[in-house]
Amino acid sequence: MGTLLGEGKPAGAALTGGFDWVFWVCGTIALVAFPAIATLLRRATRPAAPAPEAAGPTDRVKELVS
């Protein structure tokens, strides 16, 4: 807003120009964020089932109880 006021623009036009600039910056950040979010969500998926050779804590408990 200070730059537009320094150019002699009225306060309303300077304020609108500032909001217009911020709108484009936020839009650009959002467009960059969507692929980043999609990548992070894909990495967070868990495998469908544990490997058969991996003994979990419940298997050890079953052995002790038997």
Image: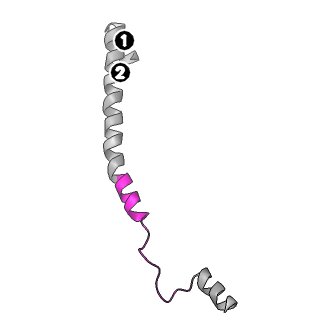
The residue shown at (47%, 87%) is 52
Q: Which residue is most to the right?
A: 64
Kind of residue sitting beneath label 2: Gly
**Closer to the N terminus: mark 1 or mark 2?**
1
55 lies left or right of 5 = right
Residue that carries the numbered disc 1 in the rendered image: 5
SS at circle 1: helix
Q: How is the image coloured?
A: one colour
The residue shown at (33%, 46%) is 32
Residue 41 drawn at (x, y percent): 40, 58
Q: Nearer the viewer, residue 18 or 46?
A: 46
Q: Nearer the viewer, residue 7 or 34?
A: 34
The residue shown at (31%, 19%) is 17
Residue that carries the numbered disc 2 in the rendered image: 18
Q: Is residue 6 magenta?
A: no
In this rendering, the answer to whether 39 lies above or below 55 is above
What is the total number of numbered labels drawn onto the structure image?
Answer: 2
The residue shown at (37%, 53%) is 36
Residue 16 drawn at (x, y percent): 32, 17
Residue 65 drawn at (x, y percent): 69, 89
Q: Which residue is most to the front?
A: 66
Q: Which residues are magenta?
A: 36-55
SS at circle 2: helix
Q: Nearer the viewer, residue 15 or 60?
A: 60
Which of the 4 image quadrants contains residue 39? bottom left
Q: Is residue 52 magenta?
A: yes
Q: Residues within 10 Å of mark 1 (few under 14, many from 20)?
A: some
Image quadrant where one finds the C terminus: bottom right
Image quadrant where one finds the N terminus: top left
Q: Foreground mark, 1 or 2?
A: 2
Kind of residue sitting beneath label 1: Leu
